[in-house]
């Protein structure tokens, strides 16, 4: 069992009960991972743990992930070190009313910190006189992040106790479990190595270089890598590229970078003011959602990308300038029924053979209208929507 703290009363209590408990604090990148300081503190980085694959039965972190800039990488590391059937248990600041995680600060490619909201610091257990910067306050997409990290089960528990004066409400604990068995048997192993997908999204040099240049995106790393691979395939086809639903420009920068030497223009469509009116019978989103953006801020985030064109306003009303073009890739991330259907009607006849329409929101319960629109549109077409476990869906033009 591993717990990401070592100077707290909780650690002392657990260590007495579980003699094999391993505790740690983060002592900085200059201290070797897994080493012990003169004060007896073990140094561990949740994004690069020193433990071997599948060596732990339980990982505990309490109010830690909000201080990790790349918390999704930390979730994947926790998954890696857990044995089949192992559990990650943790707490984080959580906004019950927010679908999305609220990003307060990001680390830029040059290592500097960019604050998107006023800085918020929490107590530092190692250096009492300083504080730990809070990079994010989590929303419900955290459950999706856990599943994308590899966990077969992910849940949030509300609890109360009269004896311990826990009164419920925002008392939350998250758990995520690594699958114990496949088809009733043990997880396959080969020469002692657990058989699990290779995390190419962490190993692809060019993809990782592009991701370092992106200061903000709501699309998790695995979905970004899928989109990047589709872009690499589309680069060999004729036709332009479009993204509908740009928000703050994260995946737009990914596409612009992926196509930087292809001669293609990436055409970017968004209101840049938030969602239009939605259908309450089909959509979970509301008018004005994702309004914390602007055309100017997105243009700044894509500074240096010379292969993009912006079309602010309501699609498809802004589409006439590209009506005569053909497309090799259309990335559709608009969340709601009417907008997804509009994208299908406009782009499907303009896709080249082999061209790809990628629907980001198809598999998410928060966007039921997106799946409905795609399924309805392609019901009488030769092409069939292909669902990807990342939650995306792809249609390849025949």
Image: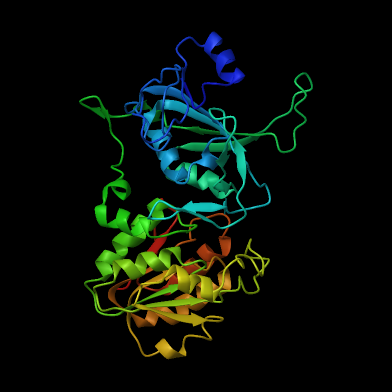
Q: Is residue 282 left or right of residue 301?
A: right
Name the image quarter holding the C terminus: bottom left
Q: Quadrant of residue 256?
A: bottom left
Q: Is residue 35 left or right of residue 104?
A: left
Q: Is residue 328 left or right of residue 11?
A: left
Q: Measured from the top left, where is residue 41 in percent x and y?
A: 45, 20
Q: Measured from the top left, where is residue 233 in percent x and y?
A: 25, 66
- Of residue 332 and residue 11, the one placed in the foreground of this image is 11
Outermost residue on the front side: it is 129
Q: Measured from the top left, where is residue 128 in percent x and y?
A: 59, 29
- Which color scheme did the rendering employ for the protein? rainbow
- Of residue 28 and residue 357, the one placed in the foreground of this image is 28
Can residue 77 be seen?
A: yes
Can residue 150 be seen?
A: no
| Residue at x 38% of width, y 27% of height | 184
Q: Measured from the top left, where is residue 330 in percent x and y?
A: 39, 72
| Residue at x 38% of width, y 51% of height | 222
| Residue at x 36% of width, y 22% of height | 35
Q: Quadrant of residue 266?
A: bottom left
Reply above or below: 78 against 99: above
| Numbered label tally | 0
| Residue at x 51% of width, y 85% of height | 318
Q: Is residue 176 left or right of residue 47?
A: right
Reply above or below: 82 against 75: above
């Amino acid at each position: 069992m591993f717990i990401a703290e070592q100077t707290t009363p909780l650690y002392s209590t657990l260590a007495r009960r579980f003699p094999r408990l391993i505790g740690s604090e983060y002592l900085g990148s200059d201290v070797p991972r897994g080493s012990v300081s003169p004060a007896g503190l073990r140094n561990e980085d949740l994004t690069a743990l020193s433990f071997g694959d599948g060596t732990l039965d339980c990982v505990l972190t309490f109010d830690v992930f909000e201080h990790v800039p790349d918390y999704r990488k930390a979730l994947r590391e926790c998954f890696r070190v857990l044995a089949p059937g192992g559990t990650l248990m943790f707490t984080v600041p959580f906004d019950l009313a927010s679908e999305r995680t609220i990003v307060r600060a990001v680390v830029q490619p040059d290592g500097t910190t960019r604050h998107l909201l006023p800085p918020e610091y929490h107590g530092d257990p190692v250096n009492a006189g300083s504080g730990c910067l809070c990079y994010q306050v989590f929303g419900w997409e955290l459950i999706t992040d856990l599943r994308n990290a590899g966990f077969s089960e992910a849940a949030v528990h509300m609890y109360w106790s009269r004896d311990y004066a826990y009164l419920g409400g925002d008392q939350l604990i998250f758990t995520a479990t690594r699958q114990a068995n496949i088809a009733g048997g043990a997880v396959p192993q080969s020469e002692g190595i657990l058989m699990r997908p290779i995390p190419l999204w962490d190993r692809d040099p060019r993809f990782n270089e592009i991701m370092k240049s992106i200061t903000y995106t709501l699309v998790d790393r695995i979905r970004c890598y899928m989109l990047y691979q589709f872009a690499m395939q589309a680069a060999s086809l004729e036709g332009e590229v479009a993204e509908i639903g740009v928000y703050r420009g994260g995946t737009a920068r990914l596409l612009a970078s992926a196509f930087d030497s292809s001669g293609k223009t990436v055409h970017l469509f968004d209101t840049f003011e938030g969602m239009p009116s939605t259908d309450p019978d089909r959509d979970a989103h509301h008018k004005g959602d994702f309004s914390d953006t602007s055309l100017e801020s997105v243009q700044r985030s894509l500074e240096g990308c010379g292969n993009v064109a912006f079309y602010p306003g309501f699609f498809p009303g802004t589409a006439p300038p590209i009506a005569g073009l053909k497309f090799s890739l259309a990335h559709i991330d608009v969340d709601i029924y009417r907008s997804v259907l509009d994208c299908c009607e406009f782009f499907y006849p303009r896709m080249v053979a082999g061209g790809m329409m990628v629907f980001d929101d198809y598999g998410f319960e928060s966007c039921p209208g997106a799946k409905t629109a795609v399924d309805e549109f392609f019901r009488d077409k030769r092409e069939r929507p292909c669902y990807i476990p990342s939650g995306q869906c792809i249609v390849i033009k025949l």
